[in-house]
Image: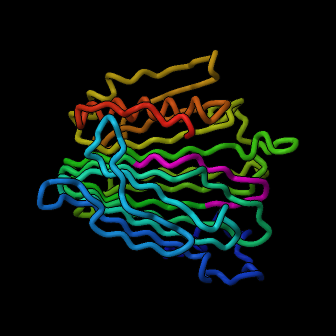
């Protein structure tokens, strides 16, 4: 597990949790999933290793737009993330394989007194692999601290659609919680298989110390989506041409797109007042990406999602 204590923004939150020690059973979840083609060229989840409280069961094939796609949902038996929780995910997609990964519900970061919650992720995509990663939103509650660190190792011919959505808190809880968490730190890096770096992006929000309501940050918006598409240059160009920057004042939605460094793909960002319009914009963009890479659309979201 990564030593998150070296992140300087975490220096005020290093006190040990007195209730359960760091790394105790139930506080140190881990997933290791591997997708590959079987003998009949069907994409399957060949290997999965899980440690509570994270749970993954058998892959399902319910995507009406791409019924051959193995779909996996990450569940948690432990409820919200609490202080001292550490999670680690590793997702590998072998040559020519493809998959969809999501979460069963929003990730809630509970109110904290000691320490912080952390997630380390590693994505490995081999030649011509394809992965859609669309988890539900993350909800940082009052006084919470949450840090994520993501490494992506991707072949030049592979495609990764990586989405993350962060809300401002429990907006409709009692009197409402808008940006009253202590810390949200999100770092993402990508590399070629030979170790050549492609890009690094880090976002740190400490709304109690410095307001995020400025123009150019969140302004009057409450939900933020960050989408990274790593794909061959020719496909990135086509996706870019088919995607419009939008300022929709009726839906309180702002959408922007630009190229990543080193011609490795695109970054797509959405701001909104509510979660559902932001999710819809992300899924519409994912459908554009899937049509470009696989020639098949993303189906309508389930009505209960």
Q: How is the image coloured?
A: rainbow
Query: As displayed, is residue 258 above or below residue 87?
Result: above
Image position, residue 199 (x, y; %): 38, 51
Image position, residue 77 (x, y; %): 60, 67
Q: Residue 290, located in which quarter of the rendered image? A: top left
Q: Quadrant of the C terminus?
A: top right
Question: Does residue 196 appear in this view?
Answer: no
Front-most of residues 149 and 101: 101
Q: Residue at x 50, y 73 (%)?
A: 2
Q: Residue at x 55, y 55 (%)?
A: 186
Q: Residue 62, located in which quarter of the rendered image? A: top left
Q: Residue at x 63, y 17 (%)?
A: 249
Q: Residue at x 69, y 52 (%)?
A: 140
Image position, residue 83 (x, y; %): 70, 69
In magenta segment, residue 137 = yes
In magenta segment, residue 136 = yes
Query: As displayed, is residue 196 above or below residue 279?
Result: below
Total numbered labels placed on residues in the image: 0
Q: Give left or right: position of 110 versus 291.
A: right
Front-most of residues 136 and 73: 73
Image: magenta residue range: 133-146
Considering every residue shown, the one lying at the far top of the view is 250
Q: Residue 219, located in which quarter of the rendered image? A: top right
Front-most of residues 53 and 111: 53
Question: Does residue 87 appear in this view?
Answer: yes
Query: As displayed, is residue 4 above or below residue 191?
Result: below
């Amino acid at each position: 597990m990564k030593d998150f204590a070296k992140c300087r923004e975490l220096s005020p939150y290093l006190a040990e949790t007195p209730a359960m020690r760091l790394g105790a059973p139930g506080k140190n979840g881990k997933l290791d999933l591997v997708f590959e083609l079987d003998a009949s060229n069907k994409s399957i989840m060949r290997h999965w290793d899980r440690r509570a409280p994270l749970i993954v069961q058998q892959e399902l094939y319910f995507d009406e737009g791409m019924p051959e796609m193995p779909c996996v949902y990450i569940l948690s038996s432990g409820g919200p993330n609490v202080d001292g929780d550490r999670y680690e995910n590793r997702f590998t997609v072998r040559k020519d394989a493809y998959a969809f990964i999501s979460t069963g519900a929003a990730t809630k970061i509970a109110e904290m007194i000691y320490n912080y919650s952390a997630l380390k992720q590693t994505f490995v995509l081999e030649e011509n692999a394809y992965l859609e990663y669309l988890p539900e939103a993350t909800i940082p509650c009052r006084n919470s601290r949450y840090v994520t660190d993501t490494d992506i190792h991707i072949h030049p011919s592979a495609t990764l659609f990586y989405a993350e959505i962060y809300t401002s808190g429990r907006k409709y809880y009692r009197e409402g919680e808008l940006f009253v968490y202590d810390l949200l730190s999100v770092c993402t890096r990508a590399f070629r298989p030979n170790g050549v770096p492609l890009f690094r992006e880090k976002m740190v929000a400490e709304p109690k110390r410095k307001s995020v309501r400025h123009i150019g940050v969140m302004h009057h918006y409450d939900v933020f989506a960050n989408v990274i598409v790593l794909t061959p240059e020719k496909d990135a160009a086509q996706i870019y041409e088919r995607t419009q920057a939008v300022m929709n004042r009726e839906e309180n939605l702002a959408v922007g797109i630009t190229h990543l460094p080193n011609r490795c793909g695109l970054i797509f960002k959405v701001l909104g007042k509510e979660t559902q319009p932001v999710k819809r914009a992300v899924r519409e963009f994912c459908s554009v990406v899937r049509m470009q890479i696989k020639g098949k659309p993303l189906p309508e979201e389930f009505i209960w999602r």
